[in-house]
Image (spheres, rainbow, N blue to C red):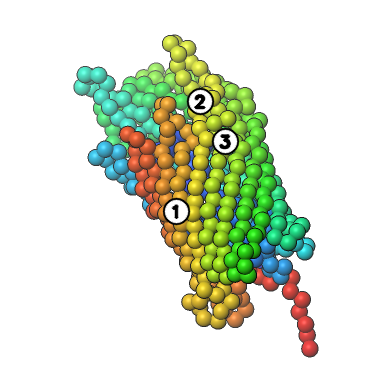
Amino acid sequence: MIAALLTAVSVNSYSQSGTKSPYNQYGFGYISDQSVGFNKGMNGAGLASRHHNQVNPLNPASYSSIDSLSFIFDAGMSAQLTNYKEGDVRKNAKNGSFDYVVAGFRAFKHVGVSFGILPLTSIDYSYNTQQRVGDASDRYTLNVYTGNGGLRHVYLGVGWEPFKGVSIGVSGSYLWGKYSRNVGNVILKAPMNDPESTTELASKQDYSINTLTREYYAELNSYKLDFGTQVQIPFTKKNVVTLAAKYSLGHKFGDNAECRVISRNPSTEVADTFIYSLADPYKLPAELSFGLEYKYNDQLRIDADYVIQKWASTGFPEHSTVGEEIQYVLNNDYFKDRKVFRLGVEYCKNENARAFLSRLRYRAGVGYATPYYKINGQDGPKEFSVSAGLGIPIVNSWNNRSFVNISAQWVRNEAKGMLKENTFRISIGVTFNERWFQKWKFN
């Protein structure tokens, strides 16, 4: 009942996670690490992780480890504060989001099933720049940049352990979303403070001279396929190493992109609109991931992940002007391959102990990611991150298997000669573990 209610709430109120960053205007914006409550504190690491009481959507092979008596439901949200610095200018922005909902259960012996909804990318930014036109004392150029949207996917995955210590899995997703980007250029008679939009400015005939707006829009619907494997190697009874790999299929979306160029003259109230479209420009890149986990006595877990996203084989539609000719074409030199490294650790003295402190899960992690897009031919920002978290058991008269996951993460994005970002993020997730399949005995 609780799981069904929260699922309904999440589908209706779901919003993209990510940052309100100007860097989101490039490519598909912010890329989610697909982490959930237990591994957010480990900075997203966990491709080789197998838990009997957690759902791990990083690798569908992990679903075979779900306990046979449990139905697991996990939902999470986050809030964050970001500081932007460029030269001597500093700005702060904050936002929050409902991040994910996942669930899992054992369907048959050695077969586990999971389903849920996860963010894939997000776009959310709004900023403006102003400058004087040449030597004119009464002419200013205002550029307004806004954008929103993103991609998410609903998945259904199956994990199977055909041989002891060897698991394979597959996950299929329906992927959907849209993005809208606007770039407005306004010639002003005087500078403005905190303008809201070029549309509003265009209506002020005594203030603006003319406006030029470029609106980029796309609505995307497609599929996503992930194939994973995990191999456990027990060196001793207490020391176990797990190797993992995952491959995500790359393919075209099959949807079109559109660009509208709108020129408005507030004096004559005339607006000219030119529409450009590009057929099938978007492609989901192939992804190859490798994971390693060392586990000691079911107390200590150390996870390392390495991910390669093949963005260089894809392109992105771009508006440009060559001479007097306006073009909207596919730029095949827009992206570059993205490489991600994550390292995480978790310690729990005894998850079955009576003592509350012995059941706490302590987590920490670090990460590094290269950019997947270029800005005017230069590499975009690199990402550095660290995290820490706690898994807090929920103990009451009817359930002692559920817990709350709390994590804090610091992320720094920086590119040479460009904007610097520092984000502090707090994430909270609740994992409900209910024994739906237990056989009751009555005396």
| Whether residue 324 is situated above or below residue 395 in the rendered picture | above
Under circle 1, the secondary element is strand
337 on left or right of 279? left
Circle 2 residue: 333
Kindly tell me whether residue 147 is visible in this rendering: no
Q: Residue furthest top?
A: 324
- Location of residue 321 by image quarter: top left
Picture disc at residue 341: none
Residue at 45% across, 31% down: 374
Residue at 70% across, 52% down: 169
- Specify few, some or many for label 2: CA neighbours under 10 Å numbering under 14, 14-19, or 20 or more: some
Kindly tell me whether residue 380 is visible in this rendering: yes
Circle 3 residue: 310
Picture disc at residue 366: 1
| Whether residue 123 is situated above or below residue 234 in the rendered picture | above
Q: Find residue 95 and report its horizontal and vertical position in percent.
A: 43, 50
- Specify few, some or many for label 1: CA neighbours under 10 Å numbering under 14, 14-19, or 20 or more: many
Under circle 2, the secondary element is loop
Sequence-wise, the earlier of marks 1 and 3 is 3
| Whether residue 202 is situated above or below residue 87 in the rendered picture | above
Closer to us: 105 or 5: 105
Residue at 25% across, 19% down: 134
